């Protein structure tokens, strides 16, 4: 959660609850209990992974409903608790961009070890980290950004913070729980530590120059009204990336949109997008000979859309229940089949036949055929010695 | 479903899908009654000899088996249709010929049960699918013609997994077949009806088809012998295709010898099948007494470790039997085996997706009407195919579709090559290989229907032979911890059926007499009791 | 689906009336590739022993294999492979080991709902067809595949769109086809027509087919696109179907070119689609696009094994195959002699005669007659006209008697009119040219006699004569006709003309 941009200078930088002068080196290793609801999530299930990243001063709580949707959909999910978060604001004071970035990187590498394809989802600073990962790891299949923090704040604003810091303040007033829906709340710290925030800005400075390095598709979801990051953040990002980007506007939510009115939209859009990029990522989205891929074997996922398409090809109609069912079951079989990617098949001929037999033919001699009446007696409908069928191309699917 | 209805009076409570079977019943009571009331002759060899010598008429044999079916099949559901009239007519004709001094052939008067994916002229051939219910083919499959010509009497068409897609006979559109040894268990599949029919004493021999283990696995689970020949050894003409480059018709019997006799009848070149090998079928019966001295036997460790401990123990015991018969037994590791399932479950569905396109409601079988041909195709196929068939069609269509062909289908084809090469390399050091047939004994009905992957795993030990196109035989060898039969598999290189049968006979001879099979009770009684042929 | 959207959005302008077809559009180039399906002249179908015959009662030439009944399996017809190799040889292709694939799509006229065809390993590749105008068109491939059944649509219109239901006859299902795919080397409707005409001649000459377009033995689809002159990239192409004759092929291609140019020039976009040539409306119309039309899921046909055409088998297959039309035309031109050959360029009357004679298989007759001493140009002319008009009579015409007839005419023993009359009797009844001429009392008038007849005619028609003298050239035919009438055809036309001109010139020179 970041500072309100509306009138930052109007806020007083004082926070009586916290002592001044307690720096990170002292408290980094203090083990505090993680707040109820802020626990990280780690779920291992198959070859397709989703990394979920929460925001500054927030916690996995804000992302949990979304992460659980990914778990339900059969993905392996990692949702780390970023350093300094989810316990006590004091723990955050000593943390810097490098710490969160490393934590995100570690979580990604852990997931990538079990999974063949990974997508990254982030809210706010989680979005900054997601961009960082995607710029650094080109094998990431897709990125979902929800009100991401990518545009570095103006120098003048930083000077104000630095001034406050120099004046002995450590923490700015809280901006967490920026949610339109009355009953909802974010589990976040009651303030925003200054030094970590300034380090975050520096992280963004470096990120901006690397945004063009991102090679995977992006789903960008931004609220119309956001009291934490400027609503221009979407345009800022779109000007700097070169990959396919889908923009979704969240009409009724504020910054923590994952817990807000548009939560369902976010979940279904994110799930569709992730199913799309993880299901198709290797064979359809990328060239087959891509040197980044160890092999041309898809990760073994299959999307609902792909299953529906296949059903049309095979002239089968599936109920929506069957569609879901088959997606999971075919996914499981395909994931199992993905083990074949381990094998080196270069130079191996495909075997379409167990026998090395050639040139089996018959002479051009007529043989008696079948009696027409016997043939047509098995036909569902016949007329004038022919098989009768309903009109062709009469009705579009 | 006609025939089996005739035979199941008073037992109409047969559960449609099988899973509702009363599992509380003890094994002893859930097994069907033993074969006491059935004909005392239980092997094809004995029946044929007795009919030809005039000791017994073919009609008597047929009637006795029909009676047995009428008594018990209501509890087993091995048959989709019992062809009583045709069987009796055929038996009378055989008796007439025998009376004239003819010898109709090695299966004279022997009742045979045919899997319902073998085309029988004017007799319904359904693949246990709604989409083909009631379809009467205008022609006989080549193997059907051959068994007829050898004097066999077709007694009925047996239940199967729909289009042979399954390992438990539960995906039949007409209800599951129950294991005659324990009706809370599956008989295996997809030739579960044929295996159950032989185990239950409905026929001494049967034909099944084996695409990924569908003859051997149910044979193992029902305690009978099942053989998959070398690909191309037996004609596929008239076998309704599941996966064309894997399918082979194979015998199911109560003894290795009967299986060998039936094998010799059905094997051999057929010009109607381009993939049929142009060579004379080898003599295998003559090799059955040759023993296994000096034969190099490799026990495939990957396949043994895929099995449960009790099954694995039986394989090791079978290996000891061979060792004490003079074979040189050793363990061999074929790591490539583990990729068999993955390759198979892409390749076979891919071929199936194309093979099953023709069921479109235009020319035969089910049609569900609709305003246009496209919608009619969709309505017919959606209504006519069951879930497992749809699943495999979808899987195969996906594996072949644009953008995925190289990654899935073509890769699996290359892995198939690697698996073949791995087995060929193994056969440089060994004459035959030994493995379990099924990783477990017969599992409970309903236990795997919702988990395709788990169901597919039960083919793990049989699939490698189908990928390689090699022959393999499953021989009953003792029982598992649950008292149900275990099958041990003898794998051999292409065209090495004589050696395979030879070794299988040694394994059979050394198998513990557990009494686990319904049929073995009959077999034991049958030996040396020719005078008591019938009541 | 996007395809549907595109076509419906563009449909109004897609059918916009194009500029006049057949007129080359300056600034544009058309790129045309043709796919020709050729039914092979085998006794039986490609994969079963059912008869390959046109016109049987519906569904009487069927068996489990060609009906796609469950359990049936294909077995390849060796003769079909041999005919495919003949076609490959005739089209100068590389003949290679081949594999059959399955092309999967649903259609009720296809019994298995897949077609057995050759995909990435066809039997013939990289060939060439030389056209009479001296250009040549590349042949990408010529592969074997099975035909589909025939569907008739029952309903008011008798066409697919308005049908109430359809009826299917599978007699044609499984008939062997070779599909010949050209490179996109063709540039106009006229050239497309020439290509198919020449291809048909080649296919017939190879013995692979009867080439009857009206019975569907030869079926043509055209892929047409246009691009601005000088542009390398290909435009979006449309496939045009239902081209049942050479005439409709040329018209349809020209229409399609004009349509696409007009569409693009008016700011539209050509949609990739299949279009149907409507003969009565003389235009191409879009066929409704099939939703999943483009994913055929080709894979190797597991029920068949690869075909390896060994050298010996190839040699046996093409044994007895004569030279192809292009080579035969060359021979004919060579036989005309050096001077005439120079005048036999494409587009000349002489070239047309050469093409006709080869097309009709009369080149051997001409060459043999010339060999015996007949005048080459006269022989060619009589063969391309009189003999061509009575092909059934060729059997009655011996080379020897044909040579003697030509020689009678060449030596002036018979006038052209007389020679034609004698030849037509020889074709109708047989016989010796000298005997026929004698029986008909044919002899060429002596020049002195001719001069008298001409003078008589001129004197009896003073009014017409003065017009001729005054320069009315057209009226000369009137005088020739009158002389012919007087002499009952015995006069030689050229001699009459010469005499008339001489008289005119002399009457001008000395005005009496």
Image: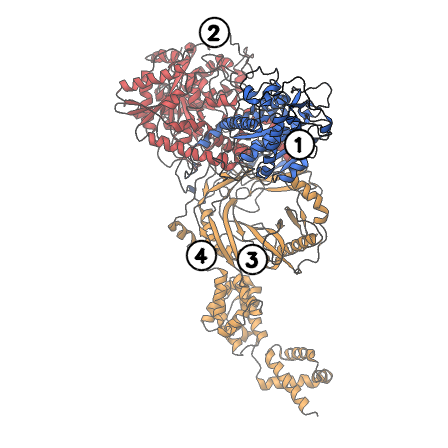
| Residue B259 horizontal side relative to residue C437, left or right | left
The chain assigned the colour blue in the figure is A
* Residue identifier under label 4: C321
Whether labels 4 and 2 share one chain = no
- Above or below for B323 versus B418: above
Find the distance from the CA under tag 3 to the CA under tag 1. Answer: 80 Å
* Residue identifier under label 3: C195
Label 3 secondary element: helix
* Residue identifier under label 1: A159
Find the distance from the CA under tag 4 to the CA under tag 2. Answer: 79 Å
Residue C461 location, quadrant = bottom right
Look at the numbered discs 3 and 1 and tell me whether their residues touch, using CB distance below 8 Å: no
Badge 1 sits on which subunit?
A
Label 2 secondary element: loop
Q: Residue C180: image x %, image y %?
A: 53, 51
Residue nearest the viewer, comparing C305 with A378: C305
Q: Quadrant of the N terminus of chain B?
A: top right
Badge 2 sits on which subunit?
B
Q: Is residue C107 visible?
A: no
* Residue identifier under label 2: B26
Q: Residue at x 27, y 19 (%)?
A: B325
Q: Residue C25: image x %, image y %?
A: 66, 59
Residue A23 location, quadrant = top right
Whether labels 2 and 3 share one chain = no
Find the distance from the CA under tag 1 to the CA under tag 2. Answer: 83 Å
Find the distance from the CA under tag 2 to the CA under tag 3. Answer: 81 Å
Badge 3 sits on which subunit?
C
The chain assigned the colour orange in the figure is C
Please tell me how crowded label 1 is: few (under 14), some (14-19), or many (20+) other residues with Cα within 10 Å: few
Residue nearest the viewer, comparing C363 with B26: B26
Q: How is the image coloured?
A: by chain
């Amino acid at each position: 959660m970041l500072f309100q941009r509306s009138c930052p200078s109007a806020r007083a930088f004082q926070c009586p609850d916290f002592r001044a002068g307690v720096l990170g080196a002292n408290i980094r290793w203090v083990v505090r209990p993680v707040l109820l609801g802020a626990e990280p999530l780690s779920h291992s299930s198959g070859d397709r992974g989703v990394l979920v990243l929460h925001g500054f001063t927030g916690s996995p709580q804000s992302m949990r409903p979304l992460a659980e949707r990914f778990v339900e959909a059969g993905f392996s999910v990692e949702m780390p608790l970023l350093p300094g978060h989810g316990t006590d604001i004091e723990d955050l004071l000593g943390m810097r961009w490098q710490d969160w970035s490393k934590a995100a990187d570690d979580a990604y590498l852990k997931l990538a070890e079990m999974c063949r394809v990974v997508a990254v989802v982030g809210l706010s600073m989680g979005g900054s980290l997601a961009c960082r990962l995607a710029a650094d790891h080109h094998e990431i299949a897709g990125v979902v950004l929800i009100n991401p923090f990518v545009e570095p704040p103006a120098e003048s604003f930083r000077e104000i913070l630095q001034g406050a810091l120099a004046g002995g303040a450590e923490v700015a007033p809280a901006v967490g729980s920026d949610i339109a829906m009355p009953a909802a709340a974010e589990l976040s710290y009651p303030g925003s530590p200054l030094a970590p925030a300034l380090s975050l800005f520096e992280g963004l400075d470096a990120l901006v120059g690397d945004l063009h390095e991102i090679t995977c598709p992006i789903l960008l979801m931004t609220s119309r009204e956001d009291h934490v990051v400027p609503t221009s953040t979407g345009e800022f990002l779109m000007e700097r990336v070169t990959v396919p980007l889908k923009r979704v506007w969240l009409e009724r939510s504020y910054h923590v949109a994952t817990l807000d009115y548009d939560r369902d939209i976010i979940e279904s859009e994110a799930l569709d997008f992730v199913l799309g990029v993880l299901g198709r990522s290797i064979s359809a989205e990328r060239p087959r000979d891509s040197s980044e891929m160890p092999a041309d074997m898809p990760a073994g996922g299959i999307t609902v859309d792909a299953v529906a398409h296949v059903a049309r090809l095979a002239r089968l109609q599936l109920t929506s229940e069957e569609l879901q069912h088959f997606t999971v079951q075919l996914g499981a079989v395909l994931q199992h089949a993905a083990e074949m990617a381990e094998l080196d098949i270069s130079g191996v001929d495909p075997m379409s036949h167990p026998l090395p037999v050639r040139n089996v033919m018959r002479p051009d001699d007529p043989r008696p055929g079948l009696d027409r009446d016997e043939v047509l007696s098995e036909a569902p409908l016949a007329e004038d010695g022919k098989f009768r069928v309903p009109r062709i191309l009469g009705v579009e699917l | 479903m006609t025939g089996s209805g005739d035979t199941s009076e008073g037992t109409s409570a047969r559960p449609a899908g099988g899973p509702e079977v009363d599992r509380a019943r003890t094994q002893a009571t859930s097994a069907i009654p033993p074969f006491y009331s059935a004909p005392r002759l239980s092997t094809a060899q004995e029946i044929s000899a007795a009919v030809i010598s005039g000791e017994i008429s073919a009609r008597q044999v047929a009637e006795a088996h029909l009676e047995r079916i009428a008594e018990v099949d209501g509890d087993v559901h091995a048959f989709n249709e019992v062809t009583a009239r045709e069987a009796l007519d055929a038996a009378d004709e055989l008796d007439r010929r025998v009376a004239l001094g003819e010898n109709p052939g090695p299966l004279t008067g022997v009742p045979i049960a045919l899997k319902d994916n073998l085309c029988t002229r004017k007799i319904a051939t359904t693949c246990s699918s709604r989409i083909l219910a009631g379809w009467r083919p205008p022609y006989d499959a080549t193997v059907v013609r051959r068994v007829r010509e050898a004097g066999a009497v077709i007694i009925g068409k047996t239940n199967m997994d729909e289009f042979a897609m399954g390992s438990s006979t539960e995906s039949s559109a007409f209800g599951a077949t129950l294991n005659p040894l324990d009706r809370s268990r599956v008989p295996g599949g997809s030739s579960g009806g044929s295996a159950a029919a032989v185990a239950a004493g409905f026929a001494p021999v049967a034909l099944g088809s084996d695409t990924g283990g569908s003859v051997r696995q149910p044979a193992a689970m029902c305690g009978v012998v099942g053989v998959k020949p070398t690909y191309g050894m037996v004609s596929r003409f008239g076998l309704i295709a599941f996966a064309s480059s894997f399918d082979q018709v194979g015998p199911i019997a109560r003894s290795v010898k009967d299986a060998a006799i039936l094998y010799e009848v059905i094997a051999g070149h057929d010009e109607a099948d381009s993939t049929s090998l142009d060579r004379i079928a080898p003599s295998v019966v003559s090799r059955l007494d040759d023993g296994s001295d000096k034969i190099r036997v490799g026990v495939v460790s990957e396949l043994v470790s895929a099995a449960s401990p009790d099954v694995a123990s039986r394989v090791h015991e079978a290996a000891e039997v061979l060792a004490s018969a003079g074979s040189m037994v050793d363990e061999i590791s074929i790591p490539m085996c583990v990729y068999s399932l993955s390759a198979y479950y892409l390749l076979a569905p891919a071929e199936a997706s194309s093979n099953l396109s023709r069921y479109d409601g235009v020319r035969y079988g089910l049609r569900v009407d609709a305003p246009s041909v496209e919608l009619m195709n969709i309505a017919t196929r959606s209504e006519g195919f069951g879930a497992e068939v749809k699943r495999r069609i979808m899987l195969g269509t996906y594996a072949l579709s644009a953008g995925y062909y190289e990654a899935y289908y073509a890769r699996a084809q290359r892995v198939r090559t690697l698996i073949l090469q791995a087995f060929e390399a193994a056969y440089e050091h060994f004459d035959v290989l030994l493995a379990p047939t099924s990783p477990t004994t017969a599992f409970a009905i309903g236990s795997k229907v919702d988990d395709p992957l788990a169901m597919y795993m039960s083919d793990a030990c049989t699939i490698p032979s189908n990928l390689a196109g090699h022959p393999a035989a499953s021989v009953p060898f003792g029982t598992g911890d649950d008292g149900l039969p275990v099958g041990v598999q003898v794998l051999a290189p292409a065209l090495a059926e004589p050696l395979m049968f030879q070794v299988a006979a040694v394994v059979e001879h050394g198998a513990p007499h557990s009494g686990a099979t319904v049929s073995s009770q009959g077999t034991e009684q049958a030996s040396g009791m020719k005078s008591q042929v019938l009541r | 689906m996007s395809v549907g959207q595109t076509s419906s959005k563009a449909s109004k302008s897609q059918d916009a009336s194009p500029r006049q077809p057949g007129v080359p559009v300056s600034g544009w180039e058309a790129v045309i590739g043709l796919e020709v399906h050729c039914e092979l002249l085998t006794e039986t179908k490609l994969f079963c022993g059912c008869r390959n015959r046109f016109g049987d009662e519906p569904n009487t030439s069927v068996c489990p294999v060609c009906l796609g009944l469950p359990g049936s399996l294909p077995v390849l017809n060796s003769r079909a492979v041999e005919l495919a190799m003949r076609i490959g040889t005739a089209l100068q292709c590389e003949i290679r080991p081949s594999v059959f694939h399955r092309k999967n799509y649903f259609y009720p006229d296809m019994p298995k709902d897949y077609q057995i065809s050759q995909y990435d390993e066809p039997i013939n590749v990289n060939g060439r067809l030389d056209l009479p105008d001296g250009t040549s068109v590349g042949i990408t491939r010529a592969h074997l595949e099975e035909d589909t059944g025939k569907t008739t649509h029952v309903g008011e219109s008798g066409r697919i769109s308005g049908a109430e239901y359809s009826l299917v006859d599978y007699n044609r299902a499984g008939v062997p086809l070779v599909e010949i795919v050209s490179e996109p080397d063709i540039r106009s409707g006229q050239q497309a027509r020439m290509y198919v005409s020449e291809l048909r001649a080649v296919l017939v000459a190879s013995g692979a087919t009867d080439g009857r377009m009206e019975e569907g033995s030869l079926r043509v689809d055209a892929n047409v696109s246009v691009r601005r002159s000088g542009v390398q990239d290909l435009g979006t192409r449309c496939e045009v179907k239902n081209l049942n004759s050479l005439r409709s092929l040329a018209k349809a291609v020209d229409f399609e070119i004009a349509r696409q140019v007009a569409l693009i020039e008016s700011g539209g976009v050509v949609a990739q689609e299949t279009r149907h040539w409507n003969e009565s409306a003389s235009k191409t119309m879009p066929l409704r696009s099939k939703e999943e039309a483009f994913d055929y899921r080709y894979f190797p046909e597991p029920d068949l094994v690869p075909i390896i055409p060994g050298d010996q088998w190839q040699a046996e297959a093409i044994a007895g195959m004569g030279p192809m039309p292009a080579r035969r035309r060359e021979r004919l031109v060579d036989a005309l002699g050096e001077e005439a050959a120079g005048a036999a360029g494409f587009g000349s009357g002489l070239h047309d005669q050469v093409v006709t004679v080869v097309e009709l298989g009369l080149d051997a007759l001409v060459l043999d007659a010339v060999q015996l001493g007949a005048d080459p140009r006269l022989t060619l002319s009589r063969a391309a006209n009189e003999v061509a008009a009575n092909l059934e009579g060729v059997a009655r015409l011996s080379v020897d008697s044909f040579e003697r007839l030509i020689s009678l005419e060449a030596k002036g023993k018979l006038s052209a009119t007389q020679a034609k009359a004698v030849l037509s009797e020889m074709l109708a009844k047989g016989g010796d040219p000298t005997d026929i001429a004698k029986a008909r009392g044919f002899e060429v008038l002596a020049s002195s006699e001719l001069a008298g007849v001409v003078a008589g005619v001129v004197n009896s028609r003073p009014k017409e004569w003065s017009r001729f003298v005054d320069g009315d050239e057209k009226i000369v035919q009137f005088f020739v006709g009158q002389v012919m009438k007087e002499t009952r055809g015995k006069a030689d036309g050229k001699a009459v003309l010469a005499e008339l001109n001489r008289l005119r010139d002399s009457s001008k020179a000395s005005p009496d």
